[in-house]
Amino acid sequence: MGYRVAVVGATGNVGREMMAVLAEREFPIEEIAAVASSRSQGSEVEFGETGKMLKCKNIEHFDWAGWDIALFSAGSSVAKEYAPKAAAAGCVVIDNSSLYRMDPDVPLIVPEVNPDAIDGYAKRNIIANPNCSTAQMVVALKPLHDAAKIKRVVVSTYQSVSGAGKSGMDELFEQSRAIFVGDKPEPATFTKQIAFNVIPHIDVFLDDGSTKEEWKMVAETKKILDPKIKLSATCVRVPVFVGHSEAMNIEFENEISAKEAQEILREAPGIMLVDKREDGGYVTPVECAGDGATYISRVREDPTVDNGLVLWCVSDNLRKGAALNAVQIAELLGRTHLKKG
């Protein structure tokens, strides 16, 4: 016996990826619904590579009664209006927006990191999915934190345009083409030209000079992993279609060598260690696209601090940063609480 699952925002990049991941992982489904805005009503999306086409249902008229799980990937405004309605009808919401992440009554889950937190889902019947850049980072940090206790992290991100949705991907493509034919690239989704450029600005600026994306990484890491960890982030948009990269400097309370860290990471859940100290012996976004793993490379000791390490972390932001993590939460929920599959 399977679950009745609704995917909200099914026509978007992450929604389509959720469909693909559900099918790939053979999530136990009795019935699946593609739910979207009124303008997408009637349009069709494929359920993974099964060949099964689903007609999109209008969220404004969707009856949540009898549905077990709803995977939301439609933004904060949609989640604010419809997630409580779904939850009130007995459907557990797993929301990919930032709306509920810092709500003390809503667990913020990365299954490899804090699975026990899922026990708190019943307070609101809502579970939050973390920011894409946070998700891969805490997967990398968790086993190292368990081994040597992290004091401080300084991270610089190199985030792909797919993090800004289809419009971001389209803008990179159109600007690249414009440059090749001699036209002037016009920014629209991003604040400056993204093609052949990098932009140290993701989301809005805050009073202290940081951006909201940087604040999310700090606040979410504290909620998911450990409130005592000090973290400083600089988030940068780069001209890559899919895959976020992160360079991390990590300071520990206890001694840990690069070799010890490699051994720990090699055995850690959700991680693939690819760390050969030779040309090409590391992973880039091109290799990680379409994969669910968090890849770690270039693990080395940081000589500027006591008990310090440096590493390179790459992951498909549409997968581990969003769709896969949401489906993993649904699997965890099924194993621990719903138990229908």
Image (tube, rainbow, N blue to C red):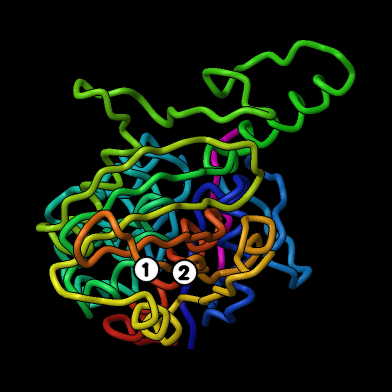
Q: Magenta residues, as a range?
A: 32-39
Residue 340 image point, x, y percent: 39, 86
Mark 1 residue element: helix
- Give the farthest residue toward the front: 303
Residue 91 visible in the picture: no
Which residue lies under the disc numbered 2?
A: 327
Q: Residue at x 81, y 20 (%)?
A: 178
Identify the mark nearer the N-term, 2 or 1: 1
Q: Is residue 243 left or right of residue 214?
A: right
Q: Quadrant of the C terminus?
A: bottom left
Packing grade of label 1 (10 A; few <14, some 14-19, many >=20) is many
Farthest residue to the right: give it: 181
Kindly check if marks 2 and 1 are in contact, taking CB atoms under 8 A apart as contact.
no
Q: Residue 328 versus residue 317: which sits nearer the camera?
A: 317
Tell me the residue that label 1 is attached to: 139
Tell me: residue 123, above or below residue 111.
above
Check disc 2 and give the amino acid type.
Val
> Looking at the rendered structure, which numbered label has been put on residue 99?
none
* Quarter of the view holding residue 204: top left
Q: Is residue 36 found inside the magenta-colored segment of the image?
A: yes
Find numbered disc 2 in the image and state the secondary structure of the residue it sits on. helix
Give the CA distance from mark 2 to mark 1: 16 Å
Q: Nearer the viewer, mark 2 or mark 1?
A: 1
Q: Is residue 16 magenta?
A: no
Left or right of residue 323, residue 203 in this image? left
